[in-house]
Image (tube, rainbow, N blue to C red):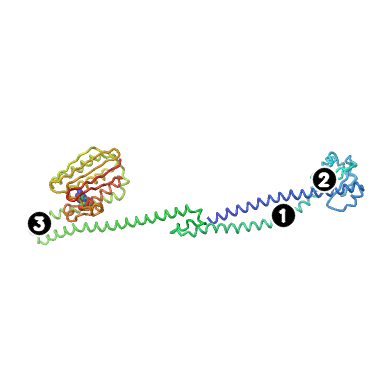
Amino acid sequence: MKKSIFRYVLAASVSITVVSFLLMVFVAYGYLSDILRDHLREELDLAARGVEMSGGEYLRGFTDKSLRFTWVDAGGTVIFDSKAGAQGMENHLSREEISEALESGSGESVRYSDTLSELRVYSALRLSDGTVLRISGSRKTLTYLMLGFLLPMLLIVAFAFLMSFLLASRIAKRLVRPINDIDPDKPTKYIGKREYSEIEPLLKRMEAQRLQIKADSAELEKTSLIRQEFTANVSHELKTPLHAIAGYAELIESGLASEEDIRPFAGKIRAEAGRMTKLVSDIIELSKLDSGAAGTQREHVDLYRIAENAVDSLEYTASEAGITIKLSGVSAVIEGIPRVLYSIIYNLCDNAVKYNKFGGSVSVNVADLGESAVVSVRDTGIGIPKADIDRIFERFYRVDKSHSGDVGGTGLGLSIVKHGALIHKASVNVESIEGIGSEFTVTFPK
Ligand code: ADP
């Protein structure tokens, strides 16, 4: 950036200098040639007066070597010439300045002189007796004058180049320095300062990005903390049934368990193994939701059909526990992932059965509200204490660990519900009264 600023500024000032130099040369050239012409005319006027008074004698006495006088009669014959012999010179009537002077009284021209082999300026005047006096000066004089003028001008131009170079490098440094001085951690501290006013939008963007990065890294930290916690929880949750299994197996192996204990112990081992299987499959389900489920192809799914399947598969467990489970409502089609939608509804129904009372009921309803579809699962169960409602969607959170353990809970069901809902941009709402029952409502946008 510094280099390109330097180059631009240098190029601009050098071109301005060059153009002004050329213009000055042009003006000076015109000015000097005007002066020379006026000078020539004055000399001619003087000489004309001399010739009028004392004839050709006056011209013979003239000593200026750079000027040439020619005197011709009205017929163009040369009477006198200060540089060449008048005899033998051709008729001068055809000379532009002479014919002009004969006609109008005075004439001028610039041309190449055959007699003197150089470019000359001519000025002619008609005298009162009808003859014409002509003066000519060398164009070289103008060249000498121009050279005398150009030399100091060139020195000035060289100086201007040097100054441009120094200025360009100073300007480049000056412009870039405040930018390099910016502390990327505190871009706002430069806002309002004079030398930063033009880059305020940049400073504001830097600040916005800095805050974004800060937020992102905080989020990342939080995520990694949650992961660590999750891993620790998983190991802990797996250890509990494993310890139980190992304990019962040991009792049987060592012969400490009596013959009639063996069957119930085996039953306990099977139950614990079942809990482990449920835990592992919930973890797999959750990690599937975590990674990539969002990108899965969506299809038209009827929530009523899904609810029907979930209710069917829980009917047996429910009736075993003395609980009636029934489905009502209408079909409601949304765009979604069938497997995930099933998990959401199944887990809600499963909880409604698990945390219910003998003789209680579970009502599942599917409603189509046009803009949205709503699935609600209401139970007449034990309810959730107010203090816990905000936390039940956390991984491994259980209100009453011992009860949840008894009914085969893993603490992951509602996490799966929350995550699955998130993927479908659905919202989950809970209303619960301890001892009376709970209602979970999931609202899917269409
Ligand atoms: P769990 O596998 O233990 O059921 P969840 O994540 O599904 O785990 O639920 C978390 C906790 O929320 C449960 O342990 C239970 O205490 C409470 N809970 C969930 N659903 C209900 C419900 N319908 N009635 C009462 N308590 C519930």
In the displayed structure image, the side of residue 321 where residue 75 appears, left or right:
right
Mark nearer the viewer, 3 or 1 = 1
In this rendered view, identify the residue nearer to me: 48 or 83: 48
State the residue at coordinates (63%, 58%).
163
Residue kind at label 3, given as amino acid type? Ile
Dot 1 falls on a residue whose secondary structure is: helix
| Residue corresponding to mark 3 | 262
In the displayed structure image, the side of residue 289 where residue 55 appears, left or right:
right
Residue 118: x percent and y percent?
Answer: 80, 48
Residue 314: x percent and y percent?
Answer: 17, 45
State the residue at coordinates (21%, 44%).
377
Dot 2 falls on a residue whose secondary structure is: strand
C-alpha separation, residue under disc 3 versus residue under disc 1: 121 Å
| Residue corresponding to mark 1 | 150
Q: Could you say which disc has been placed on residue 123 in the image?
A: 2
Residue 391 in sight from this viewpoint: yes
Residue 169: x percent and y percent?
Answer: 58, 58
Mark nearer the viewer, 3 or 2 = 2
Residue 243: x percent and y percent?
Answer: 18, 59
C-alpha separation, residue under disc 3 versus residue under disc 2: 143 Å
In this rendered view, identify the residue nearer to me: 94 or 324: 324
Classify the position of the C terminus by image quarter. Answer: top left
